[in-house]
Amino acid sequence: MGNYMIPAGAAAVAFLLGFLLHRMLVAREIRGAESESERIVHDARREAETIKREAVLEGRDAISRERSKMLEELQERRAKLDRQESQHTAEVDKLNIARERLQDRQKAVDAREGVLAEMEQSLNAKHVRANKLMEEQNRLLEQIASLSRDEARKLLMGNLEDEARQESLRITRKILDDAENAAEDEATRILATTIQRCAADHVVENCVSVVNLPSDDMKGRIIGREGRNIRAFEAASNVDVVIDDTPDSVVLSCFDPVRREVARQAMEKLLEDGRIHPGRIESVVAKATAEMEKKIKKLGAQLALEANVSGLHPQLIRHLGRLRYRTSYGQNMYQHSLETAHVCGLLAAELKLDIPLARRIGLLHDIGKATDQDIEGSHAMVGMELAQRYEESKVVCNAIGAHHEEIDAESLYAVLVQASDAVSSARPGARRETLELYVRRLHKLEAIADSFDGVKKSYAIQAGRELRIAVKPEVIDDDAAADLARMAARKIEKDLEYPGQIKVTVIRETRASETAR
């Protein structure tokens, strides 16, 4: 009995061990299956995320390509409109020139008719006088026939005195005419000598600057995702960035030369650095603006040095530097002031006057054009007020204010600067009227926008076809912004003459920022 119990116990133990081993194997297979299922699910999810991400990227690329295509079409339309406007402007200029010629011819005909009428009146008067003289002579002859010797002598002496008096008047008139002709010849000689000694270049003015790109791929980086980079650059620099089909270049368009130069320098720095995003764009534009202020002061000092004028107030030197970016009828005021100073000095040398004083007046005569539109008054009167503010002499101030005859000239230097200004302005190729009128219209457009309450800043862009108005968000809400756009458009229609249409855009932007520490 005991012998049978041992195998039975061993069998039970073996069965129990086999059962436990089977459960362990089954549990291991279950765990392996669960791990495999989790891995399969994880791979499926990852693959799904990858497919989703690729689909999103492809969608964004398609949107970006479509937006780029739309921007290119917009640029083409803008270029076409610019060409049409240029053709229209050229035709208007031709019509104006033809009308001016007709008016000049009509004036010449009227003048000739006036001269002929005066000559006819003079001939009639002489004819009447001759008849009276003949009657008088006949009467005198009748009297002489009954006069005595002494009476005849007295009458003859009286006639001789009258003839001598008339002859002396004729001689005096001839002497005065000869002196006047000699004075005109001498003045012509002095002006000719001065002009020959003063060399000057022709001036060409435009409203665009071209920035060369290292490669055509940079255009996409300048535009940025969804156009945010180009919008940030235009908002910070207040210029219009034109990206067209021209290879490896972009065009910066703005009627204000200072803004355009700041934008050009900022764009070149961004291209050189390679980091182009809205924050970097604002920083670079601010830095370029500060550098431009330093450059303006340097240009003013250089202009005073070239004109050989010393002792100027630092603020006057700063205004002289700003003349580098001012034009009048297409003529650069920086070169015009230098040229006028040289001509004025040469005229003073010919007339034995104070040469340094004449050069000083010629250099400062148009300094009023360096001020912004917020200072009212003509440039001559504004320039005179600046000269008085910075303690220039009375002769200098009067000559500046009188160089367009708005006040009476108190010295010969005022006449000299008038002549020098005319010599510099009237030479061939010096000025062009259409650009000056165009710039005045753009300044007036911005002034209309600035006249409304709550306006922070306004910019005329797109060659004056669009007006962007940035408002203070704490003063103007969304509804008031729409009303402001409507009122600005109505005021432009009422107060301004312009070709085509002008789009008014009101920008209301709020920003919130916080620093993580």
Image (spheres, rainbow, N blue to C red):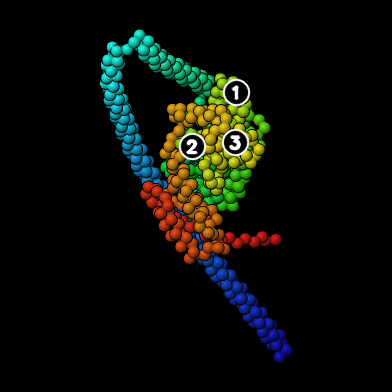
168 versus 322 height, above or below: above
Of residue 118 and residue 328, the one placed in the foreground of this image is 118
Q: Amino acid at mark 2?
A: Ser
Label 1–label 2 contact, CB within 8 A: no
Mark 1 highlights which residue?
Answer: 353
Upstream in sequence: badge 3 or badge 1: 1
Cβ–Cβ below 8 Å for labels 3 and 1? Answer: no
Q: Residue at x 60, y 30 (%)?
A: 360
- Res 472 visible: yes
Q: Which mark sits nearer the N-terminus, 2 or 3?
A: 2
Mark 3 — residue?
Answer: 397
Q: Residues within 10 Å of mark 2 (few under 14, many from 20)?
A: some
- Labels 2 and 3 touching (C-beta < 8 A): no
Which amino acid lies under the numbered mark 1 shown in the image of this protein? Leu
Residue 319 image-quadrant placement? top right
Task: Give the x, y percent position of residue 327.
Answer: 50, 37
Q: CA distance from mark 1 to mark 2?
A: 29 Å
Please report the residue visible at 34 percent of the width from the left and 38 percent of the height from the top.
96
In the rendered image, the vertical position of residue 146 relative to residue 303, given as above or below: above
Q: Which residue is mark 2?
A: 328
As drawn, which residue projects farthest toward the right?
2
Relative to 7, is 316 above or below?
A: above
In the picture, the quarter occupied by the N terminus is bottom right
Mark 2 → mark 3, Cα distance in angstroms? 21 Å
Residue 69 drawn at (x, y percent): 41, 50
Left or right: 41 as drawn, with respect to 392: left
Nearest the eye: 173 or 336? 173
